Image (cartoon, rainbow, N blue to C red):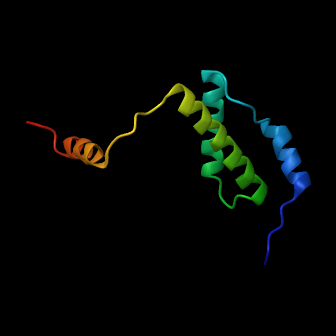
Amino acid sequence: MTLTFDQAAYSNLLAEVVPKVIETEEDYNHALVLAERLTFAKNRTLEEQAIHKLIVTLIEAYEAQNYPMDESAPDEILQHIGSQLHPPS
């Protein structure tokens, strides 16, 4: 059985969710709640999957701008993980 994308259902979902560019911490927190709800929803429809992908993309863009992470070399990552698993006595 092939599922088809229902444009009307997607439009209704867009109207309910009203996704937008995340500009504030309040917007960010709202997007996180929505993303979490969609992440753990059972039997997500194709339309819900599309909204989820959109929300996650908006969250990633906000985090890249407001919470940048420095690039780490693989050995630095392993050292960090090792130090977390076996802290010095």
Q: In screen coordinates, is 77 left or right of 48?
A: left
Q: Nearest the camera: 87 or 72? A: 72
Q: What percent of the width, then of the height, locates residue 51? A: 73, 47
Against 50, is 27 above or below?
A: above
Q: Residue at x 26, y 45 (%)?
A: 81
Against 70, is 1 above or below?
A: below
Against 5, is 86 above or below?
A: above
Q: In screen coordinates, is 81 left or right of 14?
A: left
Q: What percent of the width, then of the height, locates residue 80? A: 25, 41
Q: What percent of the width, then of the height, locates residue 48? A: 74, 52
Q: Residue at x 64, y 21 (%)?
A: 24
Q: Is residue 32 shown to the viewer in this render? A: no
Q: Residue at x 22, y 44 (%)?
A: 79
Q: In screen coordinates, is 33 left or right of 44?
A: left
Q: How many numbered marks appear?
A: 0
Q: Residue at x 87, y 45 (%)?
A: 12
Q: What percent of the width, then of the height, locates residue 83? A: 20, 41
Q: Nearest the camera: 42 or 61? A: 61
Q: Nearest the camera: 56 or 31? A: 56
- Which residue in the rendered view is the most extreme toward the left? 89
- Which residue in the rendered view is the most extreme toward the bottom? 1
Occupied quadrant, residue 44: bottom right
Which quarter of the rendering shows the C terminus? top left
Which quarter of the rendering shows the N terminus? bottom right
Q: Nearest the camera: 34 or 78? A: 78
Occupied quadrant, residue 15: top right
Q: Is residue 49 shown to the viewer in this render? A: yes
